[in-house]
Amino acid sequence: MKRTGVLVMACLLTACAGTTNTAARRANRGRKARPISVELGKVFEKGNRTLLYGGKLETSHFDITKSSLKSEQLHYGIGREVFQALTEPRFDSAKKANRWLKKGDRVLALKDGKSVKVYPISLLKHHEVVNDVVDGRAIFAAYCILADLGAVYERTLAGRTHTFALSGYTYFDPKVWEGLDGFVLWDRETESLWWPQSGKAVSGPMLDAPMRVLDEARWSQTTWGEINSEYPDARVLAKGQKFTQTAEQIKFGNKYKGERFSGKAPEDAIAPHWGGNKAL
């Protein structure tokens, strides 16, 4: 069953990078047929805690004792970072990227000083999350093919820098983001779960902490043709970046264990729908 779930999710991750919101809805038509996590035993009790399966190691499970999630709305559960995020991304020149990028290919573009960094959707669909630093600011670029959600976020929240990646789960809420399924993220520092469609943490020490979309004047949802014509010296996320660790080898843990988020939610917690931010 787990192998089937991995294969199904892999198919979703490698779908056409030109996905539109219509295509995202089409991808969600089979949502009810997707493996519901609670029915697969991914949600279980241990002592006085409610845990969510996170991998082969007992230390990989997520503590969702305090959570805003509804278990029956979770899908899959293939293990955290089966598809790994990038933490030290490499970039190529625009000239080299022109060999494989087409004018109509969708990208996230981000100002980096006097230059621009470009994250092609066709590559983000493989990593889903790219942790990066721009102008000394910790950020991450993310794309979810199911919800057609692509945005750039701050990684420094509540005064601390977090490293984001995939949890192995998708989640939906009929009242949020047109009811589309979307990837659930986690951060390695607090092991909290985050759902970008709601714009906040949904479990763990950071429960209810808002995500923070980077100032929309600094990035855009656009195409390679538009960026390449205006910024010919742009740097583009390189193809073929290999993972150096397995999910079990990644060193993570509750650095902030026992602490809870407290603070006022900013207004910029939820990303714009694709095409809603073109102002680079």
Image (cartoon, grey):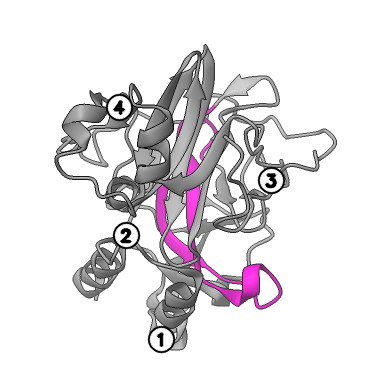
Q: CA distance from mark 3 to mark 4?
A: 28 Å
- The first of marks 2 and 1 along the sequence is 2
Residue drawn at point x = 36 percent, y = 44 percent: 225
Residue 238 versus residue 42: which sits nearer the camera? 238
Front position among marks 3 and 2: 2
Residue 119, x across and y down, in percent: 37, 38
Residue 81, x across and y down, in percent: 32, 46
Say few, some or many: other residues with alpha carbon within 10 Å of mark 4 (under 14 / 14 to 19 / 20 or more).
few
Residue wearing tag 3: 207
Q: Which residues are magenta?
A: 162-191
Residue 17 versus residue 80: which sits nearer the camera? 17
- The first of marks 1 and 4 along the sequence is 1
Residue wearing tag 4: 89
Q: Secondary structure at mark 1?
A: loop
Residue wearing tag 2: 17
Q: CA distance from mark 3 to mark 2?
A: 32 Å
Say few, some or many: other residues with alpha carbon within 10 Å of mark 1 (under 14 / 14 to 19 / 20 or more).
few
- The first of marks 1 and 3 along the sequence is 1
Residue 166, x across and y down, in percent: 40, 49
